[in-house]
């Protein structure tokens, strides 16, 4: 489940929380297997967490999603022991924080884990920078250092210039940013966020999600993020845990949750989701159809284009010369969009694209190396980008070249996306259209 190497940063094992006067009675073998409603009706206790286990890797955003009352807030509070769990373990870097003394716990809350709530209570009579640096003040950090750090984190969250304003002068979204800045000031490894954007207007909310994504790319914190909103979960989560009645019913990547929901509860959540928002380019791309190695020269590249191209020139059926070879010196029939993707000889590294007309000209002029003829494609796609991102990038593209290369993080050519692929995806992934995703 965890993506990083080594042990996960947060490991939750068999965590239970029972609200009521005698939780231990509910945790006996007689009661612990009964449903939440049975326990509530017969014993007046609430099972808020039921045997919750999951791992969060370092630098990962782990989203916990579920309907209201499913136990999300209880869970995140238990991770800081703002609520004491009834049973189980919470290991952070291998240490069980449930065994911490109260002073260890204070240190843990101040330095290791920061928490952001739905409505962040700023201190109304203190300015923004003091609010942002408040945690450091509690730690007894010197004022100069505090203000410097406060300025840094305000800049990180996009509030540079607001240092000396008072909280009432800021909008709700900006106040949440101050909350985030405060949590970041102590540079914690772990951020716990309980529906931090739920009270904001949709537009501001979206903006905050984007900011968090950007910030996370830079900071790589371990984030546990609570939400009841699937779109938010899909946008932010590396992993999503779906909770119901205090238990986790499924943990998986956004794609797994959407394309392979474990039960009806999860599929109810995901049934209206736009698949284009989650499925990666990888899932719709084709293998590159026409490729040539750089060392093969323009002649080979040209023959590849002629043999495999589906443009007006069909080398096999309509050769340029009678003996079946394409006399490229004479050939003027290449369409402007015909091209080959050129890669390095042994590592599939994408070097650029070679148009048929450039290759033909090179052959005429006796140029042996294609290197100087290569063009940079107007758009290079990543296999991991979502189809939505793909659509956003090609929307203004004139399809001068009718295929775009898909290049992975190591610079290797792994696929291509044609205009036809984009059209099919746009139709096939429209809301309400079922697609085969497995
Ligand atoms: N202090 C409490 N005493 C009794 N029941 C509680 C208490 N806090 C929460 N609960 C109950 O535990 C369940 C989970 O609540 P909560 O964790 O707040 O859910 P969520 O954050 O998913 O909406 C709910 O049924 C809620 O009523
Ligand atoms: Mg809650």
Image (cartoon, helix red, strand yellow):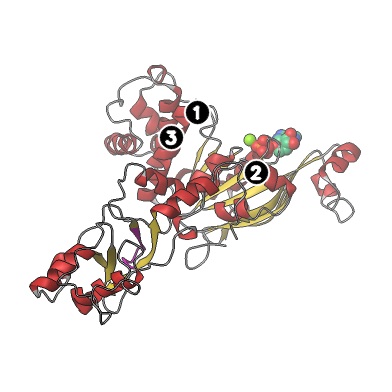
The image quarter containing residue 124 is: top left
Mark nearest the camera among 2 and 3 is 2
Say whether residue 133 is left or right of residue 205: left
Residue 400 in the image: state x and y as whole percent.
27, 51
The answer to whether residue 407 is magenta is yes
Within the displayed image, which quadrant is ligand 2 positioned in?
A: top right
Q: Which of marks 2 and 3 is nearer the N terminus?
A: 3
Residue 138 seen from this side: no
Residue of label 1: 202
In the rendered image, the quadrant that contains the N terminus is bottom right
Residue 256 in the image: state x and y as whole percent.
59, 56
Secondary structure found at label 3: helix
Residue of label 2: 271
Mark 2 and mark 3: Cα distance apart in space: 25 Å
Mark 2 and mark 1: Cα distance apart in space: 21 Å
Q: Which residue is drawn at 51% across and 49% down?
A: 278
Residue of label 3: 208
Part of the protein shown in magenta: 404-412
Q: Residue at x 90, y 53 (%)?
A: 30
Secondary structure found at label 2: loop
Q: Earlier in the sequence, mark 2 or mark 1?
A: 1
Q: Which residue is drawn at 53% across and 28% down?
A: 119
Q: Earlier in the sequence, mark 3 or mark 1?
A: 1
């Amino acid at each position: 489940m965890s993506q990083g190497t080594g042990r996960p940063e947060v490991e939750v094992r068999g965590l239970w929380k029972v609200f009521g006067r005698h939780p231990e009675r509910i945790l006996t073998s007689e009661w612990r297997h009964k449903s939440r409603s049975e326990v509530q009706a017969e014993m007046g206790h609430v099972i808020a967490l039921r045997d919750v286990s999951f791992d969060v890797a370092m630098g990962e955003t782990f989203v916990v999603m579920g309907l209201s009352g499913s136990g999300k807030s209880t869970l995140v509070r238990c991770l800081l022991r703002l609520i004491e769990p009834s049973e189980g373990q919470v290991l952070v870097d291998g240490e069980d924080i449930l065994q911490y003394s109260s002073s260890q716990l204070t240190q843990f809350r101040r330095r290791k884990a920061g928490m952001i709530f739905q409505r962040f209570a700023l201190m109304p009579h203190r300015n923004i920078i003091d609010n942002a640096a408040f945690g450091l003040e509690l730690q007894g950090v010197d004022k100069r250092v505090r203000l410097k750090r406060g300025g840094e984190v305000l800049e990180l969250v996009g509030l540079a210039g607001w240092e000396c304003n008072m909280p009432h002068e800021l909008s709700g979204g900006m106040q949440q940013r101050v909350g985030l800045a405060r949590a970041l000031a102590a540079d914690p490894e772990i951020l716990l966020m309980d529906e931090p954007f739920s009270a904001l207007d949709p537009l501001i909310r979206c903006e905050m999600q984007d900011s968090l994504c950007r910030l996370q790319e830079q900071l790589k914190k371990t984030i546990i993020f609570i939400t009841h909103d699937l779109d938010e979960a899909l946008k932010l989560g590396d992993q999503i845990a779906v909770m119901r009645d205090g238990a986790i019913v499924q943990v998986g990547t956004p794609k797994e949750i959407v394309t392979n929901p474990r039960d009806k509860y999860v599929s109810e959540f995901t049934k209206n989701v736009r698949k284009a928002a989650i499925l990666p380019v990888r899932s719709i791309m084709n293998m590159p159809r026409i490729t040539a190695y750089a060392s093969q020269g323009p002649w080979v590249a040209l023959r590849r284009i002629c043999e495999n191209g589906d443009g007006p020139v069909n080398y096999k059926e309509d050769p340029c010369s009678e003996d079946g070879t394409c006399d490229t010196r004479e050939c003027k029939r290449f369409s402007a969009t015909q091209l080959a993707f050129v890669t390095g000889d042994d590592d599939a590294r994408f070097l650029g694209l070679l148009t048929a007309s450039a290759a033909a000209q090179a052959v005429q002029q006796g140029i042996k190396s294609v290197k100087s003829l290569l063009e940079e494609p107007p758009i290079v796609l990543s296999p991991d980008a979502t189809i939505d991102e793909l659509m956003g990038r090609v929307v203004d593209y004139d399809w001068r070249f009718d295929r775009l290369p898909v290049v992975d993080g190591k610079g290797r050519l792994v696929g291509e996306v044609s205009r036809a692929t984009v059209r099919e995806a746009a139709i096939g992934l429209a809301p309400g259209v079922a697609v085969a995703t497995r």
